[in-house]
Structure formats: structure tokens, C-alpha cells
Image (cartoon, grey):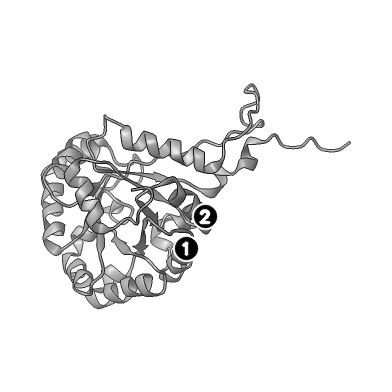
Amino acid sequence: MLHSMVTMAALQQMKRDGTKIVGVVVYDYQMARIVDRAGVDIVSVGDSVGVNMWGQESELDVTLDQMLLACKAVRRGVTRALVSCDVPYGPLQEGPDAAVRAATRLMKDGGADMVKLDAAAEHPEEVRAVVRAGIPVWAQFGITPHTAKKYDTRRAGPSADMAAGLKDQFVAEAQLLEDAGAALLDFTNSGPVAGPAVTSAFAAPVTVAVRLAVEKLSASTQPNRPVERPKPRVEIVLSLLTAMRSTPSQPVSLASAAITTRVLTERSARPSPSPSA
């Protein structure tokens, strides 16, 4: 799919063929260009941009205007992958009309190909309304940033045992979202028990939010490691892409990698200049 435009129909066929679908979370034009050239299938503009790039306390603080800003930047950098943009916290909670207005802005003004709706299982009518408006929905459910307080995971964080114990509930939520018309499902913090139960039960592609981070190599953080000539950034992402597509231990249809601009700059692999005397 590297040399052709990615379509929703192509993702459905990849699910039927058992081919891994690879998506990455990026926030800016330069990273969007890199991952698109590397051949990923979905470029996701996550509301985690507020935490990772702008220093906000949580994803719940991000506004629609902020998501539009990031979405526009990413859209300019992508020519072949599908671009998804998160609808921030608020519009879904306000009702179907507000959800459709927000999704329409992200599609029309932001250039998104589809929108991701967090806590979608709690808002099936809003999902249906957005789908009826002709907007493809990537429905996020499970233990997500927008539902974490409900599961009281603020201290210890979500665990695989917690997801396993809620397997039947999550399977039912996935069914609800598929019936509502969601084109893709994002099962966050799914775990090794509930994840496969959902991915094998439904025709829609299911992502499980497996996140990979690229560690920054620098002389200051790794003083005993010789500084090597850095790889081009596209080569790094291609290596990541290959690993994500070929990982046999993940019975899922999509892996997603969160990558920030800072950790993939060639400059990060160079030693800091010594201060002048």
C-alpha cells in the first residue's frame, strides 16, 4: 500500500486478509511527512497533543480550536495515508448536534478523513449522528483518557487484569459501536484477553493502542555509547513500521505508535558542543 492512496475499503480488506494496519500519532507537519513517506496507513492527530506538546494537565483540557490547529498542520504533510483527528472532550457530552458540528469542522476546516470519538460507547446516539452526517468514525472505547476516572485508574493505571475482568462488557460495547456504524474501533488498554476477544469477533478493523516510543540517542544521556552517524528519520520510521507489521505476538489488526518530533531529529544524535572557555 506504500505507493497507493489508503482508503477505508483498503483497511477493511487488510482486516479480512489478516494484514496488520499501522497507524501513528503525530502532531505536526514535519512528522506527518516522515511517517507518510514511510508508508503508514493511518496518521492520527491525538488530543494527547495538549499534554505532550503544550504542557496541559490532561487530554480533557484540549479544545476544538487546538485540535483544528494540529489537524491542519498534519493534513498538509500527508498525501497518501488516512488522517484521523480526535474530537476533544466536550462536544460528545453536549449531545448529537454538538458532536456533528465538531466533527464537521475537523473534516471541513481541518482536512481530516475521519474523526476519532473517545468514550464512544457511552454516546452511541452521537456516534450514529456523526455517521449519518457522512463522516467516518473511529470509535474509541475501553479504559481511555476520557473514561479513566470511571474506572479509577488515576493512581495505579489500567491493568491487563482489569481489562480481562471487563471482557464481556467491552465485547458488548464493541457490538454497540459496530451497530452504530463505526468504521473502525479503537480498543484502548485492551490487554491480552479482552483484546483478541474483540478483534476476532467483529468485521471492523480494531486497533488496540499499542504505543511505541523512539528513545533519543545523545552523548549526554548515554555517555558510554559511541556517537554514531544518525540514520535518516524516514529510515528510523521504516524500521518501526516493519517491526509493527511483523510482530507475531500481537493478535491485533492495528498497532499505533506515539512519536514526537523531538526524538526523531538527526540533531538529537549529535553530542552537545563543549562550552567555550
What residue would you read off at disc 2?
A: 53
Q: Earlier in the sequence, mark 2 or mark 1?
A: 2
What residue would you read off at disc 1?
A: 70
Tell me if residue 226 comes above or below residue 63 in the rendering: above
Q: Residue furthest right?
A: 277
Q: Is residue 42 left or right of residue 9?
A: right
- Please count the marks in the image: 2
- Res. 271 in view: yes
Which residue corresponds to the image point at 20% horizontal and 50% vertical from the top-left? 13
Q: Secondary structure at mark 1?
A: helix
User: Which quarter of the figure has residue 132?
Assistant: bottom left
Q: Nearer the viewer, mark 2 or mark 1?
A: 1
Quadrant in which the C terminus appears = top right
Q: Position of residue 205 (x, y in %)?
A: 21, 50
User: Which quarter of the figure has residue 82?
Assistant: bottom left
Q: Position of residue 58 (x, y in %)?
A: 42, 56
- Res. 54 in view: no
Report crowding for label 1: few under 14, some 14 to 19, many 20 or more residues within 10 A (C-alpha): many
Q: Amino acid at mark 2?
A: Met
Query: In front here: 55 or 176?
Result: 176
Tell me if residue 75 comes above or below residue 215 in the rendering: below
Structural distance between the alpha carbons of marks 2 and 1:
10 Å
User: Which quarter of the figure has residue 129?
Assistant: bottom left
Which residue corresponds to the image point at 44% horizontal and 35% vertical from the top-left? 239
Look at the numbered discs 2 and 1 and tell me whether their residues touch, using CB distance below 8 Å.
Answer: yes
Report crowding for label 2: few under 14, some 14 to 19, many 20 or more residues within 10 A (C-alpha): few
Q: Amino acid at mark 1?
A: Ala
Q: Is residue 122 left or right of residue 101?
A: left
Tell me if residue 96 comes above or below residue 208 in the rendering: below
Q: Position of residue 22 (x, y in %)?
A: 33, 45
